[in-house]
Amino acid sequence: MILLKSNAEHIFWLGRYLTRTQYLCSLFPFQDTESALAYAHAFCLPAFDADSLNELILNEEQPTSFSSQFQYARYNVQDLRGVLSAKSYAELNHLLRNACENPSYICDVVAECEEVLESESDDIFLFFSLGQCLEQFDQQLRMQQNLSNTLPKIEHIVAALVQLGWNNLEEAWLELKHSPNNQNFYHFSDHIQNMFEVNI
């Protein structure tokens, strides 16, 4: 199956939204002001202590809330109806709906969605993994965490993308690999976004 650029982009963003939600779930609920402010500052959220950040995350009208993130993920799944197998499409919708309705289930849903997507074609899982890794890298940069585990994963994915004809990524990737900072990350991200706008 030839994966269209628009479908690859939906899969990529599905990986990013689910990984973003999983990371937030691992920290929620915030218990102290110091950790809450560190997260709020890193992600530019209008919170001033743990309670205000927890309220923000649970407020369905906020774009950073659990509810909003899962809604974004569901939109991406719906756009993949003709790409995913009928079984995978139904399972993903069921998982995301359950996560929206049962907050205690949120932390488990990403791993289960990953298992579903692993059963699809290699290209589908490749772009899902790309979204996951870039979101993890973004989080680690923002929170000043160790990048050593994520860099090899991205390098492996870039090598696979080059095999698909994404040769323009190599230079931007080498810059990021040698100097993993915000500027080079955004430059690399822009290259990926630009590649979605040309034929895969």
Image (tube, rainbow, N blue to C red):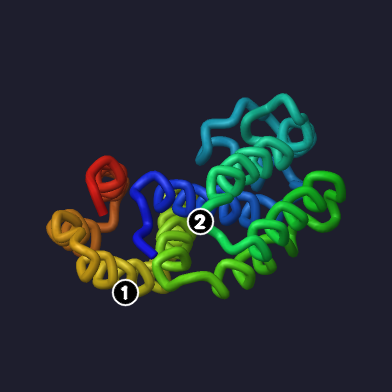
Callout 1 touching callout 2 (CB < 8 Å): no
* Residue type pointed to by label 1: His
User: Residue 68 in the image: x percent, y percent?
Assistant: 67, 35
| 85 displayed left or right of 145 | right
* Residue type pointed to by label 2: Val
Q: Secondary structure at mark 2?
A: loop
Q: Which residue is mark 1?
A: 156
| 142 displayed left or right of 96 | left
Q: Nearer the viewer, mark 1 or mark 2?
A: 2
Where 71 falls versus 115 (above or below)? above
* Quadrant into which the N terminus falls: bottom left
Residue 10 - label = none
Question: Front-most of 197 and 61?
Answer: 197
User: Residue 191 in the image: x percent, y percent?
Assistant: 23, 46
- Residue drawn at (65%, 47%) of the image: 35
* Quadrant into which the C terminus falls: bottom left
Q: Secondary structure at mark 1?
A: helix
- Residue drawn at (71%, 57%) of the image: 90
- Residue drawn at (25%, 47%) of the image: 195
Q: How many marks?
A: 2
User: Residue 173 in the image: x percent, y percent?
Assistant: 21, 59
Mark 2 residue crowding within 10 angstroms, few (<14) / some (14–19) / many (20+)? many
Q: Is residue 3 visible?
A: yes
Can you tell which quarter of the image residue 73 is in? top right
Q: Which residue is mark 2?
A: 83
User: Residue 15 in the image: x percent, y percent?
Assistant: 52, 55
Q: Is residue 145 visible?
A: no
Marks 1 and 2 sit apart, C-alpha to C-alpha, by 24 Å
Looking at marks 1 and 2 on the same chain, the residue that comes earlier in the sequence is marked by 2
Question: Front-most of 1 and 21?
Answer: 1
Question: Front-most of 148 and 170?
Answer: 170
